[in-house]
Image (cartoon, helix red, strand yellow):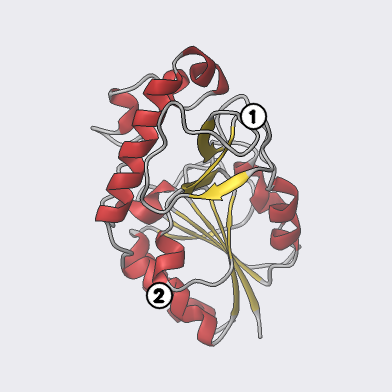
Amino acid sequence: MKKIVVLTGAGMSAESGIRTFRDSNGLWEEHDVMEVASIEGWHKNPGLILRFYNERRKQMYSCEPNKGHMLLAGLENDYDVEIITQNVDNLHERAGSSKVLHLHGELTKARSSINPSLVYLLGDQEIKIGDKCEKGSQLRPCIVWFGEEVPAINEAIKIVESAEILCIIGTSLNVYPAAGLLHYAPSGCPIYLIDPNPPSGISRKIEVIAKGAGEGVAELIKRVKHK
């Protein structure tokens, strides 16, 4: 089966009602990014960060996978599909995608604030001050914040290097190291970008599908049938 690698960002989940940081009325307008998405913010005010991500988790469970999520899952019937997502929601999994790598962590998990290898499934539970791992350290969201390394980036690079078709959906291509992944696609690998407002200045040759996630993935499926 031909290998399709899909990189997804906030625009992938926006059609499901997941609020993004950069859109108008987005999360950045309510919160300073360094207060709720940095390791410094955690040390300064862990209670604020726990409340913020508890709210994000609650919102996630009020949303459903959209047409784009469902179509990507359905591609597994005909292709070897691997998804690398910058999103921390579980909508790809809930749609039925079987191979999903989360670059920036997952809302459905908590981890030790001291030992990142101690990870726990949360489901829809909240994390509160005083909730601790078995070794006694405070639990924190299993999220990669600004100021922290991205542990999954090397695995993501290997996946992109194996792509026969690469598709990028709903990402500004401004957040590194994720934005640099497209440069690891093999020479000659067709690259598609699905975004109603595609970023400019991309050096690689890319076919742009200027649509939202749902309609964009439907168009992608039509195009890859001829590859």
Rendered location of residue 201, percent (x, y):
55, 40
Disc 2: CA contacts within 10 A as few (<14), some (14-19) or many (>=20) = many
SS class, disc 1 = loop
Question: What residue sits 29% from the left and 33% below the top?
Answer: 26
Question: What residue sits 42% from the left and 36% below the top?
Answer: 127
Question: What residue sits 43% from the left and 18% below the top?
Answer: 35
**Image-based side of 81 in relation to 58, left or right:** right
Alpha carbon of mark 1 to alpha carbon of mark 2: how far?
A: 33 Å
The quarter of the picture where the C terminus appears is bottom right
Rendered location of residue 21, percent (x, y):
36, 34
Q: Mark 1 sits on what residue?
A: 148
Question: What residue sits 66% from the left and 86% below the top?
Answer: 1
Amino acid type of disc 1? Glu
Q: Mark 2 sits on what residue?
A: 71
SS class, disc 2 = helix
Tell which of 158 and 189 is nearer to you.
158
